[in-house]
Image: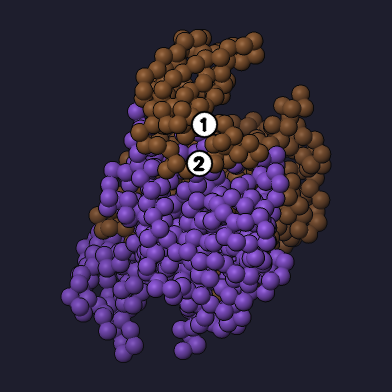
Chain colours: A brown, B purple
Amino acid sequence: MNTITDFSFDADELRLTWTDGRNSKLDAIWLRDHCQMPASRDPVSGQRLINITDIDPEITIKNIALEDDDYKKVLIVTFSTDDYQSHFTSSWLLENCYCLNEQSDSRSAKYKQLWHGSSFNNDLPKFNYAEFCDDLQTKITALKAVKDLGFCLLQKVPCEDKQVLKVIQQFGFIRDTNYGEIFEVRSKVNANNLAYTNLGLGCHLDNPYRDPVPGIQLLHCLQSTTEGGESILQDAFMATQVLKEENPEHFNRLSQEYINFRFQDSDADLYSRVPMIEINDKQEVVKVRFNNRSIDTIKLAPKKIRPFYQAYRHFAEILEREDQQIHFKLEAGELMLFDNTRILHARKAYSKGGTRHLQGAYSDLDGLYSTLSVLQRNEIVAE
Amino acid sequence: MNTITDFSFDADELRLTWTDGRNSKLDAIWLRDHCQMPASRDPVSGQRLINITDIDPEITIKNIALEDDDYKKVLIVTFSTDDYQSHFTSSWLLENCYCLNEQSDSRSAKYKQLWHGSSFNNDLPKFNYAEFCDDLQTKITALKAVKDLGFCLLQKVPCEDKQVLKVIQQFGFIRDTNYGEIFEVRSKVNANNLAYTNLGLGCHLDNPYRDPVPGIQLLHCLQSTTEGGESILQDAFMATQVLKEENPEHFNRLSQEYINFRFQDSDADLYSRVPMIEINDKQEVVKVRFNNRSIDTIKLAPKKIRPFYQAYRHFAEILEREDQQIHFKLEAGELMLFDNTRILHARKAYSKGGTRHLQGAYSDLDGLYSTLSVLQRNEIVAE
């Protein structure tokens, strides 16, 4: 077991040596701020009871002691201010020390399994809905597919009105919008959105004009007797990687230039100003927005117009490559559950004969990630 | 009226001169992409029918004609590809041309009325709830206060259970979370969150561990007979401006370093990785996250720890300055409606005698902005 084998300190920092030979240097202010004692942390909620301004800005380390028994090593830090003492277990320090642990971003492309059209060999992440509801392991696997691959398919979902909302309640919360808690995807006259026609729709992410954009989309197929109307899914995170490989300047352009998306009808006027490719501080992709139908007027500075269009066209071309896509026909009783910040969806045009009826709904990623994390915690306890 | 007085063109761009002497240069690809004709835009939804990849990458302008009648000037652009023609009205070009119009970000601090403690002279944006519901102008003024100042107070809101959800339905959509559609703010034993104790809470924004963070918070006071428990509001956008003025490096530090926020209890495990001060491409502040209780372990690179703490402490000190805050006691029947990406709230500790009972709920900014925009549109039509 990796534990503390040696330590030293001065007023400003604590230095630790670990069994595996690694070293940590921990700042006095960080140690005081991360004190886990009941005076500093609420024992029930685990929430911090002190403000940063409660800590003496000149705080230093006065003494360090290492208590060592059979079970665990505990480091006792005595601070200069009021001789305040904090106890840190070796295991807590190992897990939380900023020298040994890097912050990771569970939303970033770096921590995902990126895929293209042939990644699955016809073996898509499909799950039986009854098992998804009743079996802990199936639900964990399915939600993990959404986290890692960006999507899963549920099968034998009862073809009942508003069933899609019951599916959301299995892992998260309904995101109500101006389209209603559920939206009906089928042809109608005078549609306020092209989704509600029988036209084909190119690869897109939904509602980029909404801020915050809904992180999860569900599409539940209730009827599917038309010719055509096949579904297409595509990994936009993979597409950004391809874009970056083929032309880093185009990638940078789309991550740096903010554009507007907009949706207007008689009841709504939704507007966002965002980059097409959103990156974090480590230049990792965390969110993509792509929807040709709802890009608002492009109002970049004149000199940026042509380079922007070159980058935009390049990205759009990648998104049309069939080898990047998976194609399948959603049958009645099937449901697609996907990350709407990452997985593009499209559908082919369909015949006017027959009926194609999907019910859709939105939810958010944080609820799904939270449920997955709690289930995984419970799984460990059960083992 | 400002209209087109002269034009010229070559294959790549159209040049316009306006009545007021200004000039526009518009790129061929931009003109084709922004074609407003029924072949390119759905006349009902206004959505684009073409993909960027449908446009010839070598497209050029073949001819320009200006039709001029008593009512409006129409520019007819003939493109090289298939002699395709687009008609643009002078008024559309005036409003949408990227040379004359800059993209603005309705979420950014630049377009807000920033305030400090003495900005209101005891004249807070308060509205009678019945008038808010029934009178178009009152609702517009109240929602505009939320957009511009970040908050408003509603009075004489019926002290009924779940009334706060009815208030949300007046302008937007309920954001359900692990705390439920509504959360009860009153003391309870073994609280999973310090909000549910009688302790004072420092200035904070709610749920920074949620991604997306709820953009709107409502707190409805049902009972208020304790001693203490006064409410405090503060403009975090103003605080970021003060921070930048006092120490630009501290401002940069907090906008560049991403940190983690986290909330865990038996039913939830919520996690975000975000900067405390979020800026857009123009370095304008668009979102603040501040909550000492739920900052997770700071795992920055070792050399960044001390500079981060200096900046964080400085920002926290600004947030404790009473001259930046407004203080008032929320009475039964009063409701605070505020932008949770901007307006910090706090409460003072309160006595164990008496009852303080608030019901809270979350919503999102985009729904409120959309409703405001539609109401303002209707107001213009009604005039």
Instruction: Residue type at mark 1: give it.
Output: Cys
Identify the amino acid type marked 2. Ile
Is the residue A269 above or below the residue B346 in the image?
below
**In the image, is B145 to the left or to the right of A129?**
left
Residue under the point 50% across and 9% down: A5
Q: Answer yes or no: do the residues labelled 1 and 2 have beta carbons within 8 Å?
A: yes
* Residue shown at the point (45%, 13%) measured from the top left: A7
Q: In this view, does A34 lie above or below B107?
A: above
Residue drawn at point x = 66 percent, y = 39 percent: A44
The quarter of the displayed image where residue A284 is located: top left
Q: Which mark is residue A50?
A: 2
Report the Cα–Cα distance between label 1 and label 2: 10 Å
Vertical arrangement, residue A41 with respect to residue B108, above or below: above
Q: How crowded is mark 2: few (under 14 residues within 10 Å), some or many (20 or more)?
A: some
Q: Residue A25 at what x, y percent from top left?
A: 41, 21
Residue A35's label in the rendered image is 1
Percent position of residue A335, x then y:
71, 48
Is the residue marked by circle 1 packed among few (<14), some (14-19), or many (20+) residues within 10 Å?
A: some
Q: Earlier in the sequence, mark 1 or mark 2?
A: 1
Left or right: A216 as drawn, with respect to A77:
right
